Image (cartoon, rainbow, N blue to C red):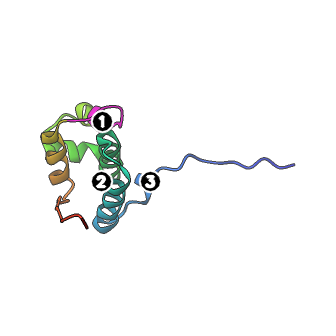
Amino acid sequence: MKKTKTTRYDVAEHLRTPKEMAAYLEACLEEAGGDAAFVAKALGDIARAKGMAQVARDAGLSRESLYKALSGERSPGFDTILKVIEALGLRLHAEADRA
């Protein structure tokens, strides 16, 4: 029987346009259930798609600290999240809940 070769799926390879990046972040925000580290990981995926070094420069952070903040292993400060979102060319918005 022939072995099937698999590769690890990397969502960053599929986030090509700002619209795709925004849609991915929106979906992750909906699925996060209050898990800030989950949202940080999603931002990390988008940052890798755009180029981590450039995002770090645009956010005014070191590349190493950006990797740590967006690893999904910790919850970065909100100021870091805001810097990264701006550096990614994205915007946060709020809307009233259905209730």
Query: Could you say whether the residue bearing mark 3 is in a helix, strand or loop?
Result: helix
Three-letter amino acid code at the position of disc 2: Lys
Say which mark, if any, is on residue 11.
Answer: 3
Segment colored magenta: 67-76
Quadrant assignment, res 16: bottom left
Q: Secondary structure at mark 2?
A: helix
Q: x, y percentage for residue 84?
A: 19, 47
Our reading of the magenta stretch's main secondary structure is loop
The answer to whether mark 3 and mark 2 are in CB contact below 8 A is no
Where 22 sits versus 29, above or below? below
Q: Amino acid at mark 3?
A: Val
For the view shown, which residue lies furthest in the right direction?
Answer: 1
Q: Which residue is mark 2?
A: 50
The mark that comes first in sequence, 3 or 1, is 3
> In the rendered structure, does residue 72 fall within the stretch colored magenta?
yes
Disc 1 or disc 2, which is closer to the eye?
A: 1
The alpha-carbon separation of the residues under discs 1 and 2 comes to 13 Å
Magenta stretch: includes residue 61? no
Left or right: 99 in relation to 49 = left
